[in-house]
Image: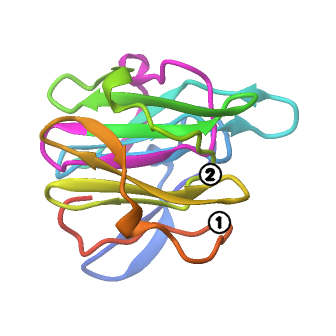
Amino acid sequence: GAKEDRLTFSTSVLAAHTDSDISLTRNNMRGCSDPGTYGYLSGGHAPGHGGLRVITDRITFADGVTAAHTDADLSQARQSSRSNTDGVTYGYFCGGWSGGIVTATDRLTFSTSVTAANTDADLTLSASNNKGGMSGESYGYQTGGGTDNVTSERIDFAAGTFATHTDADVHVIKGNQMDISDGRPQ
């Protein structure tokens, strides 16, 4: 597996942590967190000609141990999706690339650590490498995607559905952006 590092927040020290190594080396995977309990790293592309993956690794925050968790595997192999979480009940893996740009969304139920396709939350626009995956208390946002998409979509966590939300459209197409939030929930 891939070698992982762990940052200790109280000391700001980053060090190798072999118990957190992921089960299979891969690029362009996405993660979401069940705050205080588990983190999930899903999908991706194996280096070289290894192909797209459905695999999900789960890290237990209490002990820092990471292992493959097949109940949380994605419904289809893909890379470059984005994630949202309501921080309480569900995490969502949205869009991505699976031989073509996809709209599929998988929902992870935190109480069971099980992921399944969730067509009610599929994106309304095809999006790969969405430029944002920010989550707040009531809504999550997917912004941009592909090479010419500036449109944003918003998931209403109470309803579990996405809809276009032009008030959050990006103004300039940018590649490889990172997600940020104010820390509630993410």
Q: Is residue 30 above or below residue 100?
A: below
Instruction: Give the distance between the C-alpha atoms of the residues marked 2 and 1, in whole angstroms.
Output: 8 Å
Q: Which mark is residue 176?
A: 1
For the magenta stretch, what is the residue range?
Answer: 65-90
Give me the residue at 27% from left, 58% from top. 186
Q: Is residue 74 magenta?
A: yes
Residue 38, image x, y percentages: 26, 42
Q: In this rendering, would 43 be left or right of 114?
A: right
Q: Nearer the viewer, residue 44 or 125?
A: 125
Residue 113, image x, y percentages: 26, 26
The amino acid type of the residue labelled 2 equals Asn
The amino acid type of the residue labelled 1 equals Asn
Examine the image and state in which quarter residue 48 appears.
top right
Q: How many numbered callouts?
A: 2
Name the residue tied to disc 2.
129
Residue 29, image x, y percentages: 57, 44
